[in-house]
Amino acid sequence: MNAGCVAVACTLFVAASWGSKAGLSAKPPCRSGFSQNFYTVLVPRVVLHGQNLLKVTFEECRRSREVGFVSSDPDFGVRPDGVVYAERESANLSEPVQFMVTARELFDPRVWETTVKLAPAGHPRPPLALTEVSIEEMLSRVLDSLPRVIRFPRKHPRSSLGNGLRRQKRDWVIPPINVPENSRGPFPHMLVRIRSDQDKDAGIRYSITGAGADQPPSGIYNIDPISGNMFVTQPLDREERASFHLRAHAVDMNGNQVENPIDLYIYVIDMNDNRPEFKNQVYNGSVAEGSKPGSSVMQVTASDSDDSTTANGMVRYRILSQTPHSPIPNMFTINSETGDIVTVAAGLDREKVSQYTIIVQATDMEGNLNFGLSNTATALISMTDINDNPPELTVRTFSGEVPENKVNVVVANLTAVDRDQPHSPNWNAVYRIVSGDPSGHFAIRTNAATNEGMLTVVKPVDFEMNRAFMLTVVVSNQAHLASGIQSSLQSTAGVTISVQDVNEPPVFPVNPKTIRFEEGVPAGTTLTVFSAQDPDHFVHQIVRYSKLSDPANWLRINRTNGQITTVAQLDRESTYVKNNVYEATFLAFDNGKSGSPQASGTGTLQIYLIDVNDNPPALIPAEAQACQRARPNSRINISASDADSDPNVGPFGFELPSSPPSLRRNWTITRLSGDHAQLRLRIPYLEAGVYEIPITVSDSGNPQLSNRSLIRIKVCPCDDNGDCSATGAVAAAGLGTGAIIAILICIIVLLSMVLLFVVWMKRREKEKQAKPLLIDPEDDVRDNILKYDEEGGGEEDQDYDLSQLQQPESLEHIINKPAGVRRVDERPVVPESQFPVRPSLPHPGDIGDFIHDGLRAADNDPAAPPYDSLLVFDYEGNGSTAGSVSSLNSASSGDQDYDYLNDWGPRFKKLADLYGGGDDD
């Protein structure tokens, strides 16, 4: 048999040797497979049948499964424990023999392979180096190492044993067919030959079935039906399909099965044709500055599509470069198998280098740079900040000033620097006052944006008490300093604060001030002296007083010394007194310092009024009802109230007066408790009506006060429930039958008058609708032409032709008149104007609007007389007894104003133009 070296196996052997020299720092995870990818052993030239040659070791992670081994060379077999032995004798082993050992787990489709090379003792030729063999030669050797003929298993006859049992000889195990991927051909390429022992006696036809033959992906494998030669028709890709399971069949010329089908397992041998691929092109990680060597940073991961059980898919990592090279070029290392990046040196400082850029290379073939394929990725390692830089104040002493009695005033801004990460707990400053402020007048707040400390007044300072403060402040961070880092001396500074004096208002020592007095003290009584003090001790000022609030106007304050006196009697029962306390406020003000205005302060005086018995009790209720017949439940509960307080109130005394005598004869009163009593009828029957019962009520004050009150009781007939009936209520009101009848008659008369008034109004409304105007039609002169008789012009004017002054009915008499006597007062020939039509039943309110509408229409009508035309009159004669009127003058002196003619409408427009010319005159 030709002893060729499988390319993949040889490569794995070289890679394994390199990997063992490199050494791995971490134990890889458990992976099932042979302990070695290549076994080489020296054997004698003469090998006996059944002789053990070597043992292959297979590591099985799941111990519960059984592993079976198969040899690709029929001259050698493998026992279940991995021992390789000779199936038959070899008389003279002159050349090295190489074959494949395949391992399979039960119920697991995966297959593991290793290469076994047997070198005869004393053979001078060394093992073939990988660099001396081309890929094509490797593939050729793999194909040449395949078994040339695969026969159908023989059917052995059963033999009888001594105990009557029969045993059958073990059938042959068909070794798998290994085909390398990416073969360049030529195709079709023969793999094996399928033979049956019966092909000598009769014609046999061979066929194969399964995925890759007659099932998708079909056409990859075919077989010559006569010779039984099986071929692969195209290059294979292990990453698409790693194995094929076919079945070989043998039938006679009639299609009858002559052999049982045999299983053919075809495994695609992986070639290193895929580069490792990183999951990300850029990885982001971080590590704290100042980390110790060996600190974990991040992990990068790359995967290879090649077989992970072979060197083709075993990826190793290394770091190609680091940027920047500070403090040393190799600050990090990477685990070659897991991709974990860790620190290898100290000196990481974020303030110097905030980020490193690492180029990581992943190489398959277990990292063999000569034969493996590589790929790269970028790892960005950021330095996370730790508090390794204490904050430092910029100056040793700060100063500021503040007016007294002011709060929330920023006195000084404290500035500090910190080289840690801005706006982080390692950078955020915390300022504290450690000395100089025992009373807590100041506090320091941190400005989140600038990290400055704002020294603020939180409690008023007094110039008279402290004119200056000397504070000591310390600055630190929100986060504690990292281990081994000491605070800086510049973290402490002094602050000098000057207090400015201002004019302070007078202060009442006791505010509010409470005093006790009995109510009813007379006007002019001195209550107390309510004085204030000026806190400005270094400047003498005069304090004056005034009243600010006195709701009842009971008090007066002395302007100079603050003495409080009454101007009216104090009354505890007043609405201005709350809970026996009357409250008034007063104002105290000084005369101001030089250049400062007056300052004022307020004080409250609370007067607690002690009650005296000055209010008699009152009876409750004022009215009640009672049945005219005495009943057990016909009783009236009464009580008393008093505006005073204890002990000037109850228990109260209730008593009926002795006169008139009928009062005690008809009524009786019984005391129930200190505040309540019961009034009831003494006699069995009392006439219905309204009775006013006087009752004397006395309190328990000293001196005792009493009050005689009247209670109005309506006595009425009651129903079975003890309630007054309706008629009884009326009768109880004191009205007799005559009075009730008189009231009803008055109501009827009132209703009749209302009805008559409504009827009269309806009739008047109808009359208004029947009449077109509110006035009589005979008196209505609107739109009527009244023609009067002509009156003569006197004795001298009897012969005057009055027809000239009348409206001519035709123009004939004018045309026929002799010359010199002419009238041209002619009516213009224009269309008739449309005047508003008066409604048949106008509303009285519309009369004014109707008149104004008619007036406007008449003023704008050119066909209405008088006409704007020239009138020519006849000669009137020689003189008149009336004389001339030319000598008449206007009574007014000076020019007369004719501007009012402009308001008379369009008919007087011409006249207004003549006499009211204005500037044209």
Image: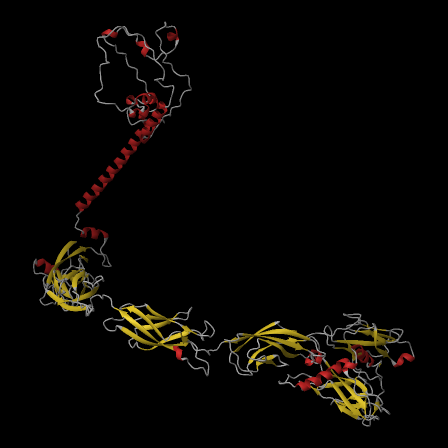
Q: Is residue 310 visible?
A: no
Along the viewing direction, whichever of 700 and 320 lies nearer the viewer? 320
Q: Is residue 199 left or right of residue 295?
A: right
Please provide percent x and percent y for residue 346.
Answer: 53, 82
Q: Is residue 688 left or right of residue 397?
A: left
Q: Name the residue furthest right.
A: 201
The answer to which quarter of the image holds residue 253 is bottom right
Please provide percent x and percent y for residue 338.
Answer: 62, 80
Residue 575 versus residue 452 in the image, above or below? above
Q: Residue at x 90, y 79 (%)?
A: 199
Could you tell me which quadrant the N terminus lies in? bottom right
The answer to which quarter of the image holds residue 858 is top left
Along the viewing direction, whichever of 365 and 485 lies nearer the viewer? 485
Q: Residue at x 44, y 80 (%)?
A: 481
Q: Is residue 488 left or right of residue 109?
A: left
Could you tell me which quadrant the C terminus lies in? top left
Q: Exactly how many numbered labels are in the figure?
A: 0
Please provide percent x and percent y for residue 335.
Answer: 61, 81
